């Protein structure tokens, strides 16, 4: 009995050890297999995978992918990671591995340059050349897609920064979309007089703090903005000071929402008539529809007028890009799809889904508000300007967006804010140029 | 034992040593060795100086509030008729995630949120303002929000402590003529000392590593005004794209947490003689 008892006691830890060892071995095998090749990014016949940070676009990719498949034989398979920060980390890490997706959605401008500089992206200069020959891309967009002369991105969409407004509210108050600075101020005064906050301004989430800055600077002097974001002008120059003083004056008059107003509530606020005008990208048209507003009936949009009539007209454009990792699982298929992405038949479906402007200038938006903006931009020959977020080195923009958020919350004066932005600009441009050298 | 040591080494010690190593390298493209360059930013960068002040405020707030409120609520709800309901109300927030708590408080604290609407309705509109916009008020209201959640666990622990106090000691005190306050001060409080040590220790560490509530409510803004060291570490590493600076903050934060925990526990356990 004692012997059998000892045997039983000895057997228990041995069994537990075996069990644990088995579990550990199983887990290790799974981990190794998982690391070696994830199912999600591995090649799947007839499709190309896309890394995407906006899960609400998945259906649009699938629809556009069905059109692509008719041309290239490959559909699109979106793989979404809705957290922008973790998305960026994952993309940058997987670019160096065999687990890279076939296509990667990324930002243009310096965000793209930074990614291209690290290596791992396919040169798409020939693809761009083909598009340019067909007139399917705007030549002015090339620089924002390039690094050291080579193109690394194909435009995914092209949005413009505009002021959405509620048509019923404007109609009730006898207002119309302002065509000049004086008319804009008149609209704001009337709205404020009727207890409607004229402008939505927000710093929730960080980046929205740049929206009014870029808009006002470009409407004071678009050429200065181009020099400023290229590191050739100072944030303490007159044009920047003038723009910040206008912004400060708007806030002081109570013309802007509190900076902790979440932009996600923008369409609802326009519909409810608590906010008069909402400065945002035209991609917000989709949000307007989701809030139950009909284009050209419930809402309209216009580009902010220039502060002086003689100032050249401009428009801020935002363009995401498709890039192709050199180590994409299905590189050939990815190149085929990126080469057909701007085909009008694909863009028709994609533009309809976004309710926004296509990056292909031959495709007119089916949203009447956006279509009218496209016509206005072409007719007025507005200078296309890269959105501030992509227009300078990322570390500089992130830091300056923080400073602008502080300014909106009343932490700093216009002069102090600009001085800090300039100090950062000097440091970050020096760092960028040092890295380039 | 060996697998545990291996796991701790692989998942804790190696990344920690690597973080220390990385903190001595610059964030330029070539990442050259920069000695203590990343650490000097604590002096030169006002955002990091503010972050240290905020962290200190968080530590004081997250230690004091749950301790005082937890003890008070536990004493008031121990052995009363409605104690179960009261306890449930206090403990419930503890079951929520930090992010969920932040969403609830965001609804309350934004400029057009519930708090300002109530104040305006009560004719106290002059008190309404952007609670999350100005420093140090925004940090203070977030500490209060955190206390709303963290007090629950302190209440549970203090209730366990109160219920383990032998009733004879209280009866003896009463027979000796001790009043309620004297009984609490000289009989209950000393016997709650071990529980208090745990509550303070936990709150101390939670205060030093506070992140989720801040991130969801303000993302450290506006203008980096509400960052704590944990938020600054994330911001520098992932948003400002300066992993070296982020690593330096991580090292400093780890040293502070370890030092504070070690000093506190060593002192408390020594006093208790364990």
Image (cartoon, coloured by chain):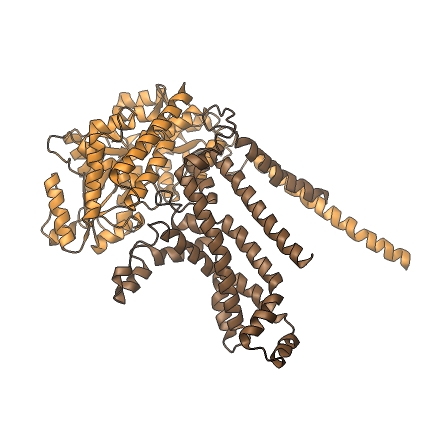
Chain colours: A orange, B brown
Residue A3 to residue A431: above or below: below
Task: Please provide percent x and percent y for residue B24.
Answer: 53, 30
Q: Give the quarter of the figure containing the N terminus of chain B.
A: top right
Decide which of B258, A125 is in the foreground and name it: B258
Residue B156 appears in the picture as rendered: yes
Hey, which quadrant is residue A387 in on the image? top left
Look at the picture and state if A230 lies above or below B41: above
- Against A209, residue B65 (above or below) is below
Q: Residue at x 46, y 51 (%)?
A: B58
Q: How many marks?
A: 0
State left or right for residue A6 relative to residue A414: right
Residue A346 in view (yes/no):
no
Query: Residue pushed farthest front?
Result: B177
Residue at 19% of width from left, 35% of height from top?
A242
Q: Position of residue A274 (x, y in %)?
A: 21, 54
Q: Please state which of residues A26 and B273 is positioned toward the viewer in this rendering.
A: B273
Q: Give residue B199's position: percent from left, percent from top.
A: 56, 59
Residue A32 location, quadrant = top right
């Amino acid at each position: 009995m004692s012997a059998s008892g000892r045997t039983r006691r000895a057997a228990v830890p041995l069994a537990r050890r075996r069990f644990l060892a088995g579990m550990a071995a199983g887990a290790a095998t799974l981990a190794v297999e998982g690391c070696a090749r994830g199912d999600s990014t591995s090649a799947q016949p007839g499709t190309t995978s896309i890394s995407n940070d906006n899960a609400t676009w998945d259906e649009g990719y699938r629809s556009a992918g069905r059109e692509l498949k008719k041309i290239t034989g490959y559909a699109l398979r979106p793989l979404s990671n809705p957290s922008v920060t973790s998305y960026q980390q994952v993309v940058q890490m997987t670019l160096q591995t065999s687990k890279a997706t076939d296509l990667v959605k990324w930002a243009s401008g310096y965000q793209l340059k930074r990614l291209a500089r690290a290596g791992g992206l396919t040169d798409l200069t020939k693809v761009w050349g083909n598009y340019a020959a067909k007139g399917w891309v705007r030549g002015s967009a090339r620089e924002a897609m390039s690094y050291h002369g080579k193109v690394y991105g194909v435009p995914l969409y092209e949005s413009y920064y505009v002021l959405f407004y509620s048509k019923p509210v404007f109609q009730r108050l006898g207002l119309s979309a302002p065509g000049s600075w004086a008319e804009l101020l008149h609209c704001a005064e009337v709205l404020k007089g009727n207890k409607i906050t004229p402008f939505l301004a927000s710093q929730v989430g960080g980046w929205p703090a740049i929206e009014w800055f870029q808009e006002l600077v470009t409407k004071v002097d678009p050429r200065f903005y181009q020099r400023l974001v290229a590191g050739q002008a100072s944030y303490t120059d007159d044009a920047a000071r003038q723009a910040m003083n206008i912004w400060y004056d708007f806030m002081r008059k109570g013309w802007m929402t509190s900076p902790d107003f979440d932009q996600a509530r923008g369409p609802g606020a326009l519909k409810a008539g608590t906010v008069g005008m909402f400065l945002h990208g035209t991609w917000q048209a989709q949000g307007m529809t989701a809030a139950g507003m009909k284009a050209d009936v419930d809402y309209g949009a216009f580009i902010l007028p220039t502060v002086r009539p003689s100032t050249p007209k401009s428009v801020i454009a935002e363009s995401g890009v498709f890039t192709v990792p050199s180590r994409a699982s299905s590189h050939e298929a990815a190149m085929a799809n990126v080469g057909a992405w701007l085909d009008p038949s694909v863009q028709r479906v994609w533009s309809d889904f976004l309710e926004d402007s296509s990056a292909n200038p031959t495709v007119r938006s089916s949203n009447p508000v956006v279509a009218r903006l496209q016509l206005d931009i072409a007719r007025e020959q507005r200078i296309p300007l890269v959105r501030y977020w992509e227009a300078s080195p990322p570390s500089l923009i992130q830091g300056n967006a923080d400073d602008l958020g502080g300014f909106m919350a009343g932490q700093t004066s216009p002069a102090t804010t600009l001085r800090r932005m300039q100090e950062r600009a000097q440091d970050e441009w020096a760092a960028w140029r040092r890295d380039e050298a | 034992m060996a697998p545990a040591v291996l796991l701790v080494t692989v998942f804790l010690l190696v990344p920690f040593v690597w973080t220390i190593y990385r903190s001595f390298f610059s964030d330029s493209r070539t990442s050259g060795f920069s000695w203590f360059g990343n650490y000097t930013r604590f002096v030169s960068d006002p955002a990091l100086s503010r972050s240290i002040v905020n962290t200190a405020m968080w530590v004081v707030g997250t230690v004091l509030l749950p301790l005082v409120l937890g003890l008070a609520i536990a004493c008031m709800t121990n052995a009363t008729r409605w104690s179960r309901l009261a306890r449930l109300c206090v403990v419930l927030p503890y079951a929520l995630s930090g992010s969920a708590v932040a969403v609830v408080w965001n609804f309350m604290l934004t400029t057009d949120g519930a708090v300002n609407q109530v104040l305006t309705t009560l004719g106290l509109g002059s008190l309404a303002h952007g609670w999350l916009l100005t420093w140090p008020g925004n940090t203070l209201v977030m500490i209060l929000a955190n206390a709303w959640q963290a007090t629950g666990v302190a209440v549970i622990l203090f209730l366990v402590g109160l219920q383990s106090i032998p009733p004879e000691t209280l009866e003896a005190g009463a027979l000796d003529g001790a009043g309620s306050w004297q009984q609490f001060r000289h009989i209950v409080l000393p016997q709650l000392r071990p529980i208090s040590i745990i509550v303070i220790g936990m709150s101390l560490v939670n205060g030093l590593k506070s992140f989720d509530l801040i991130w969801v409510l303000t993302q450290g803004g506006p203008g980096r005004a509400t960052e704590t060291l944990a938020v600054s570490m994330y911001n520098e590493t992932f948003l400002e794209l300066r992993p070296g600076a982020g690593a330096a903050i991580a090292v400093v934060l780890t040293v502070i947490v370890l030092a504070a925990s070690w000093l506190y526990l060593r002192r408390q356990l020594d006093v208790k003689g364990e």
